[in-house]
Amino acid sequence: MNAHTPRPAAKKSLGQHFLKHEHICRRIAELVLPQPQDRLLEIGPGPGALTRALEEQPHSRLLLLEKDRYWAVERQRLAGPHTQAVLMDALRFPWFRISPANPWKIAGNLPYNVASPMLWDMVAQARGMVRGVFMVQKEVGQRLAAQPGSGQYGALSVWVQSFVQPRLEFVVGPGAFSPPPKVDSAVLSFMPQDDAARPVHTAHLSRLLKLCFQQRRKQLGGIVRRCGQPALEAALEDSGIGPSLRPEQLAVTDFHRLASLWACQEQPRM
């Protein structure tokens, strides 16, 4: 990259708001709890403020996923001895490759327009994510960490909490970014759930959540009756979950139980 090449402006199409405050980057990097043997993955490094903070932490390898060609080249040009930048859209990253046999810690300032679908895929597929630390829009962060009965609790809350334990660590104002967004951001840490707490029937759980939270103000019994799924109706009867409850009142484990019963009801009878 020519030294005189002008630095490009942030691209609205990529949802770019570059983190610029070094002390916030250090806080995020420290929340990763890196150890000398750890492999770290950063999503969307951009100008590299968080990258530099991560490079200062103990680690054995730092992999950067960057969709913007300019910043991917810049990050590789300025990479530390254990850092590698890859030109890639993180929405297309094969998260299943992060397995218990191939563990990583993951961090990133996630673009507002892709954070939810990216995290939806990542938490379910990256079984080797030892820890995650992510900056997201504050509203999304509140949804990720929301508990039953709150206005923010929804499909994203249940799905993410099925695989990890999210913790809202701190809130960051618009002034920490260039250009500044119009809303606050939040930093969350993720710790993986124990295997016993993870859902077994993930496809049914995903269908169930989308079905229920499209009608979150309706009673569960009515939602199930109108969905045209007799197996789900039978599952609700077997579950012991009150049909007068609304989806936002159910715990994560209630959804797991209902999804499992639905899957069992759909199995062919011998």
Image (tube, rainbow, N blue to C red):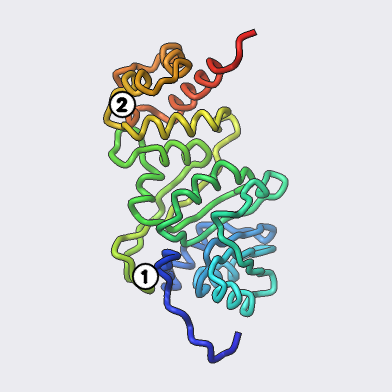
Q: Tag 2: Cα neighbours inside 10 Å, few (<14), some, or many (≥20)? A: many
Residue farthest toward the right in the current orientation of the protein: 101
How many numbered badges does the structure rendering display?
A: 2
Residue farthest toward the top in the current orientation of the protein? 270
Residue 15's place in the image compared with 22, above or below, is: above
According to the image, label 2 marks what residue?
246
Q: Is residue 36 above or below residue 218?
A: below
Q: Is 169 on the left or on the right of 81, as rendered? A: left
Q: Quadrant of residue 61?
A: bottom right
The residue positioned 49% from the left and 86% from the top of the image is 6
For this view, does 136 lie left or right of residue 29?
Answer: left
- The crowd level at tag 1 (other Cα within 10 Å; few <14, some 14-19, many 20+) is many
User: Mark 1: which secondary structure?
Assistant: helix
Q: Does residue 261 sit above or below 123 in this rendering?
A: above
Which of 229 and 51 lies nearest the eye of the viewer?
229
Amino acid on which disc 2 is placed? Arg
Q: Is residue 252 above or below residue 17?
A: above
- Tell which circle, 1 or 2, labels the residue nearer the N-terminal end: 1
Residue 21 spot, x, y in % from top left: 41, 72
Q: Please give the name of the residue rendered at 39% of the width and 44% of the height, measured from the top-left corner.
A: 145
Residue 93 position, x and y percent, is 60, 54
* Amino acid type, mark 1: Ala
**Residue at image location 36% in from the left, 34% down from the top:** 213
Residue 180 lies in what quarter of the image? Answer: bottom left
Which residue was labeled with disc 1? 176
Q: Which of marks 1 and 2 is in front?
A: 2
